[in-house]
Image: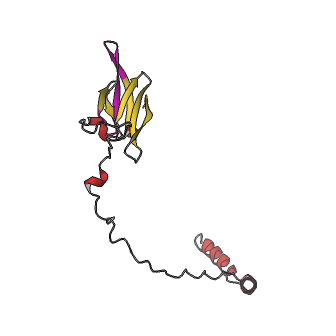
Amino acid sequence: MKRVLPLATILLFLTGCIGDRSDLELFVTTTKAQHVAKIPPLKKPPAFEHFAYQAELLRSPFVPPSRELTEEAVDASKDCTQPDLKRRKGRLETYALDNLKMRGTLTQDKRIWALVQTNDGNVFRLGVGDYLGLYHGRISKVTPQNVEVIELIPDGSGCWAERSSTLELAGE
């Protein structure tokens, strides 16, 4: 008897849900009729314009440039600042300055050395006069807080301009 009573109550509640829904259906149809979505028409696509490639005599962008185009230009006839391109490049001249971090200093016989770390984790001891960076950077001063570097930047006319950069002591 206990099972029949709850089952009968559930059936009674379910029969109440089957009643007349005509007012609900009328509301839905009137709402759909009154609120029609206004979608603006799509814009007309632009007309296709044909482009004829006219650079047959120029270097193909899919072929690497020749070595003559990528070498650094030095004009010895001009009386201006020039780097020594015959000098053998150091280990840290293959890294950009933003890939190097100053990690500390060492002092030996009243000379201060900078400890510089590359982005691949190697640490080097550098002093005044050592080279680093991609633009013939030479260390001009080492302090416990930073390393001052003078770089030579090509100006495009065969001369080179000096630019001062600094590597600050980096923490973890």
Relative to 76, is 156 on the left or the right? right
In the picture, which quadrant includes the C terminus?
A: top left
**Can you tell which quarter of the image residue 92 is in?**
top left
Residue drawn where x is 40% and y is 47% of the image? 157
Query: Which color scheme did the rendering employ for the protein?
Result: secondary structure
Residue 100 highlighted magenta (yes or no): no
Relative to 84, is 6 on the left or the right? right
Which segment is the magenta one? 105-122
| Residue 129 at x, y percent in the picture | 33, 26
The residue nearer to you, when weighing 143 against 26, is: 143
Q: For residue 86, say whether it is visible.
A: yes
| Residue 46 at x, y percent in the picture | 55, 80
Work out whether 34 lies above or below 97: below
**Can you tell which quarter of the image residue 10 is in?**
bottom right
Work out whether 91 lies above or below 71: above
The residue nearer to you, when weighing 61 against 152, is: 152
In the picture, which quadrant includes the N terminus?
A: bottom right
